[in-house]
């Protein structure tokens, strides 16, 4: 019997169910639901619940907390792509009078604006948003706790400001803009700012007894762009597919790639644990795999959306308890189960349709001083430069249309690569940001900086 390629194998499905069953049981969660996305499609959904009978399905809403920030970041990147702002713009340029206007928009997206982590007391997550009707109420008398742009410091008020920025430039409430520009185009009909039945109730589980206490579900008011949303595994699976591939109706692939590029200087502990914050997305290295997404929590709820770009697998995990399962660990485990049990099948190798002889001439071995590197022409029309052995600087380069190429990543990102030719048209060397690459180590026929000793290579007698 064969299994359709868009379905998971029975053993994989059982392993996924086992993992969430362990998480729900050991984490003492009243309920836990999860979904897995592969190749842009939801291929699995599972649920475990403490209540006998029908378990929560993919349409049951849970509060998703700070995953809301990713939605807000998408709205801000849309404004940037439309030319209504630049990420380097100070907030004051578009939203004057906040008192923290020197922070750039990118700083707020990356939590490097220097703002406090929380709004002034009382604790905003368990009190009504009507207590903080104005931005000044959210920011308080001491909104900045660090110099702007100097360090990563997670800030909920920072995303409140971004929501206000969206409202100012769109001339409509954040919730309305989100629904019109993101939720409706992506078909996220079960994602909303307020709970819509069927939805889970939020619970606190006693740390020393198997008893429950209901948590309040407050409307966060001004703080909504930082953590208000309710959603489902079905909707978040579709959102994960969008974050991985893009959708030109909402945000293109290039802008989404920018969103998942580290943008904040990590703390020492973050370097050690493999964590970085991007633009509304978190990047984590877990079990040797690079994962992108966001976690969320509000009293009564835990949430995680995570995906592996390399494996094209995503996972969503939602639970209705204040503390309990480590949802980021569970999400990473679900991605790993599928990626390892059913590895991604690569696209067939295909040769280029055509190649410019002047580019083909550059392929092969080069030397930067004595370090050997290889220049390759790839099937996607790019060229790559990488060390022949061991570790070292490597990058892909995009053609500029004038015989030069621009680096796309790593040390050479943004740097220009060009082939320098002799008067007879033959290639003398490659120039990359002032570095000279030659066909032989320290080729005396090329303009090696500092020159080459006239007596050449020698031994020691």
Image: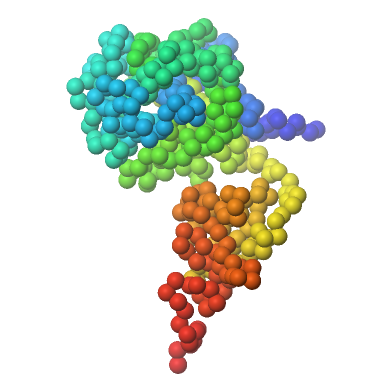
Q: Position of residue 92 (x, y in %)?
A: 30, 26
Q: Quadrant of the C terminus?
A: bottom left
Name the residue at the right extreme.
Answer: 1
Q: As rendered, which of 67 and 113 lies closer to the eye?
A: 113
Tell me if 394 is positioned left or right of 135 in this view. right
- Choose between 59 and 407: the one closer to the eye: 407
Relative image position of residue 277 (x, y in whole percent)? 40, 37
Q: Nearer the viewer, residue 359 or 260?
A: 359
**Residue lying furthest left:** 141
Question: Which quadrant is the N terminus positioned in?
Answer: top right
In the displayed structure, 47 sits above or below 410; it is above
Left or right: residue 397 versus residue 117 is right
In x, y percent, where is residue 63? 45, 17
Give how far across and how far down residue 153 sits, in percent. Answer: 31, 34
Extreme residue in the front direction: 423
- Dividing the picture into quadrants, the one containing residue 17 is top right
Q: Quadrant of residue 15?
A: top right
Between residue 13 and residue 235, name the one nearer to us. Answer: 235
User: Is 376 located above or below residue 65 in the figure?
Assistant: below
Q: Could you tell me which residue is drawn at 50 percent across and 84 percent down?
A: 457
């Amino acid at each position: 019997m064969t299994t359709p390629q868009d379905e998971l194998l029975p053993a994989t499905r059982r392993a996924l169910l086992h993992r969430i069953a362990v998480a729900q049981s050991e984490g003492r969660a009243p309920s836990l639901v999860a979904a897995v996305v592969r190749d842009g499609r939801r291929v699995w959904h599972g649920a475990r619940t403490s209540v006998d009978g029908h378990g929560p399905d993919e349409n049951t809403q849970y509060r998703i907390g700070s995953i809301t920030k990713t939605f807000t970041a998408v709205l801000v990147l849309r404004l940037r792509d439309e030319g209504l702002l630049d990420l380097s713009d100070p907030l004051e340029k578009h939203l004057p009078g906040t008192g923290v206007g020197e922070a750039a928009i990118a700083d707020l997206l990356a939590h490097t604006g220097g703002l406090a982590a929380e709004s002034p007391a009382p604790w905003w997550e368990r009190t009504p948003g009507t207590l903080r009707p104005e931005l000044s109420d959210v920011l308080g008398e001491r909104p900045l706790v660090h110099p702007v742009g100097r360090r990563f410091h997670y800030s909920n008020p920072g995303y409140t400001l971004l929501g206000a920025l969206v409202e100012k430039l769109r001339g409509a409430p954040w919730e309305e803009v989100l629904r019109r520009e993101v939720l409706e185009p992506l078909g996220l009909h079960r994602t909303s700012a307020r709970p819509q039945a069927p939805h889970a109730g939020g619970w606190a589980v006693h740390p020393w007894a198997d008893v429950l206490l209901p948590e309040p579900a407050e409307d966060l008011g001004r703080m909504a762009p930082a953590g208000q949303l309710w959603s489902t595994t079905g909707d978040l699976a579709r959102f994960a597919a969008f974050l991985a591939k893009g959708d030109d109706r909402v945000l293109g692939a290039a802008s989404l790639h920018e969103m998942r590029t580290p943008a904040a200087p990590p703390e020492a502990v973050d370097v050690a644990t493999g964590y970085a914050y991007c633009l509304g997305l978190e990047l984590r290295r877990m079990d040797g795999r690079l994962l992108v997404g966001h976690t969320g929590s509000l009293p009564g709820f835990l949430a995680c959306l995570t995906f592996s770009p390399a494996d094209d697998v995503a996972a969503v995990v939602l639970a209705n308890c204040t503390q309990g399962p480590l949802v980021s660990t569970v999400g990473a485990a679900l991605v790993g189960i599928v990626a390892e049990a059913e590895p991604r099948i690569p696209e067939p190798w295909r040769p280029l349709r055509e190649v410019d002889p002047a580019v083909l001439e550059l392929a092969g071995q080069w030397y930067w001083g004595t370090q050997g590197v290889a220049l390759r022409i790839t099937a996607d029309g790019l060229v790559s430069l990488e060390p022949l052995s061991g570790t070292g600087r490597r990058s892909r380069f995009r053609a500029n249309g004038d015989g030069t190429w621009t680096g796309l990543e790593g040390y050479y990102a943004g740097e220009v690569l060009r082939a320098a030719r002799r008067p007879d048209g033959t290639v003398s060397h490659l120039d990359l940001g002032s570095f000279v690459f030659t066909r032989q180590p320290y080729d005396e026929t090329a303009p090696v900086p500092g020159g080459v000793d006239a007596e050449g290579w020698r031994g020691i007698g």
